[in-house]
Amino acid sequence: MDVVGIIPARYASVRFEGKVLADILGKPMIQHVWESALKAKSLNDLIVACDDERIYKAVSDFGGKAVMTAKAHTSGTERLAEVVADLDVKVVVNIQADEPLVHPSMIDDVAYSILNNPATTMATLMKRIEHEEETPDANVVKVVVDKKGFALYFSRWPIPFVRDEEPGMRVHYKHIGLYGYTKDFLFVYKKLPPSKLEILEKLEQLRVLENGYEIKVIETKFETIGVDTREDLEKVKQYLTIKAKV
């Protein structure tokens, strides 16, 4: 098959344990992610890769497809690799389990950017920052790209630094953590040791850049809210409640 979507889902989140099962308007968060991802045109299969029987049961209860993976994995990338090791697939899309507002076209943009460009082995997303308070926020990862749309750097700091104010030049982009890889590159990535910049910034994708590989970054117009805290969960609930009334 061409593309498989994997939703890595672990229970023991440090800041919000069990968040993937948190209720959002009558459904667990993982179900919102699953239902949105299922609408993506590029996916030939969709799998939740979990490490806890409670997640496995919740996914099975709403009719999703889940597989149990080792608890020892230290990243979603390792969990992906375990699931796809025996699959005959070209592209693997890593869909975050704590992004209940993920839009299907975001998944398609990442998948097709790799399928349609043989030289591209990894891709992700960015969105123009519209709310200025997000720029200095260390929890909002910023990204800068070159003229061909490949990542130059990811940082928790506001990049680029605007030294002299120029009209229309104060533009920042936030990184949205949805990734696509060729299956071959996923296993190359998995074997790379943690890098210095990755450790400093606590951003796993910097391991790729620091080892000389490229990451294609596609701009999206769709907003998301990653759920790291209970406050984030309330923001998602408010957003979906308002959207339902429109």
Image (cartoon, rainbow, N blue to C red):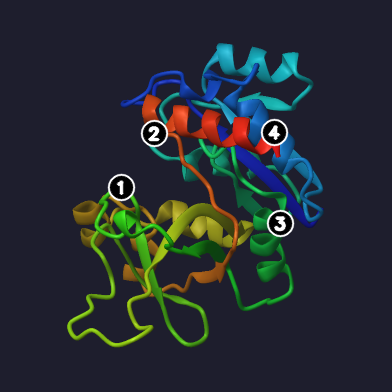
**Mark 3 or mark 4: which comes first in sequence?**
3
Identify whether 28 is placed above or below 123: above
**Mark 3 or mark 1: which comes first in sequence?**
3
How far apart marks 2 and 1 lie (CA) works out to 9 Å
Task: Specify few, some or many for label 3: CA neighbours under 10 Å numbering under 14, 14-19, or 20 or more.
Answer: some
Which residue is labeled 4 in the image? Answer: 244
Which residue is labeled 1 in the image? Answer: 139
Q: Which residue is drawn at 54% across and 52% down?
A: 223
- Contact between labelled residues 1 and 2, with CB atoms less than 8 Å apart: yes
**Mark 1 or mark 4: which comes first in sequence?**
1
Identify whether 206 is placed above or below 84: below
How far apart marks 2 and 4 lie (CA) works out to 23 Å
Residue 32: percent from left, percent from top: 66, 31
Task: Specify few, some or many for label 4: CA neighbours under 10 Å numbering under 14, 14-19, or 20 or more.
Answer: few
Which residue is labeled 2 in the image? Answer: 228
Q: Give left or right: position of 107 versus 202.
A: right
Relative to the observer, which residue lies in front, 169 or 73? 169
Q: Give left or right: position of 180 versus 12.
A: right
How far apart marks 3 and 1 lie (CA) works out to 24 Å
How far apart marks 1 and 4 lie (CA) works out to 28 Å
Amino acid type at mark 2: Asp
Which residue is labeled 3 in the image? Answer: 105
Whether residue 47 is visible here, answered yes or no, is no
Q: Give left or right: position of 150 versus 5.
A: left
**Mark 2 or mark 1: which comes first in sequence?**
1
Task: Specify few, some or many for label 1: CA neighbours under 10 Å numbering under 14, 14-19, or 20 or more.
Answer: few
**Mark 2 or mark 4: which comes first in sequence?**
2
